[in-house]
Amino acid sequence: MVRFKNKTALVTGGTSGIGRATCLRLAAEGARVAVLGRNVKEGKDVVKAIKTAGGKADFYRCDLAQQAQITRTMHQLLADYGHLDVLVSNAAMMTYKPLLELDLKDWDTVLSVNLRAFAQLCQLCLPAMPAGSAVVVISSVHAHQTTSGVMPYAASKGATEAVVRALSRELDIAQTRINAVAPGAVDTPMLWRNPNVQNGTEKIEGAVGRPEDIAAAVAFLASAEAAFIHGATLVVDGGRLAQL
């Protein structure tokens, strides 16, 4: 299956976990992939893996907490690529403190990386996205049911899904579609680094997905097969929400 032949794609947070799997999946299906992240070594490793498999990829270092850096990076990327057929906004961060212990600077950073950067990427990329293009953003089951100590993350993901619904009203479905994927527990460093998981406050019960499971959903929503899906959130959680 080669759904992205001669297409270009950008994946933020593309150096590990879901982002890495998405880069590999899109490249395997023919896309030239821009891997965006902060870790240069991991980024180069993803590019090497894609090229070794016969695909095309480039790494762009960018800190999504830095507004000016996002602008510079996107200007360079769009100058290099000319246009963008797929935008996957995946990069995110979490905090693990209750509100009364939370430094509001951390609140601002989480909302900046998880939400404002997504909006900024859309502003910068949408004018360069041709008819038939797609935006896919990674949300979370935390947008629907959450646990203690992760309020900024849950808030950012709930707002992300609201942005998807609102922006779908501003975009012509024939030009650029926008949708979200809400993963449940996925076997990534972000899951196992979570101190709430480590100390048992948040219990991982039931199925734990693979990054490739989420990448498959992203590839579907970004492809022409999903041409009639717009402003939606696809929950990919192995039934986790049904247990919460």
Image: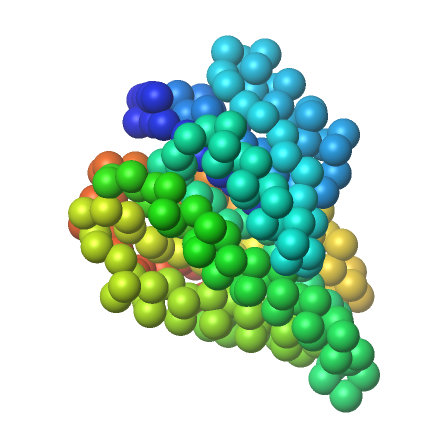
Residue 73 at least partly seen: yes
Colour scheme employed for the rendering of this structure: rainbow
Residue 212 lies, with reference to residue 101, above or below; the image says above
Q: Is residue 218 left or right of residue 198?
A: left
Residue 206 at least partly seen: no
Spot occupied by residue 186 in the image (x, y as percentages of width and height): 58, 49
Spot occupied by residue 231 in the image (x, y as percentages of width and height): 30, 61
Image quarter where the N terminus lies is: top left
Q: Residue furthest bottom?
A: 100
Residue 93 lies, with reference to residue 52, above or below; the image says below
Q: Residue at x 78, y 63 (%)?
A: 195
Residue 49: quarter of image: top right
Q: Residue at x 74, y 79 (%)?
A: 104
Q: Residue at x 48, y 72 (%)?
A: 158
Q: Is residue 133 left or right of residue 212?
A: left
Spot occupied by residue 190 in the image (x, y as percentages of width and height): 69, 52
Residue 131: quarter of image: top left
Spot occupied by residue 144 in the image (x, y as percentages of width and height): 46, 72
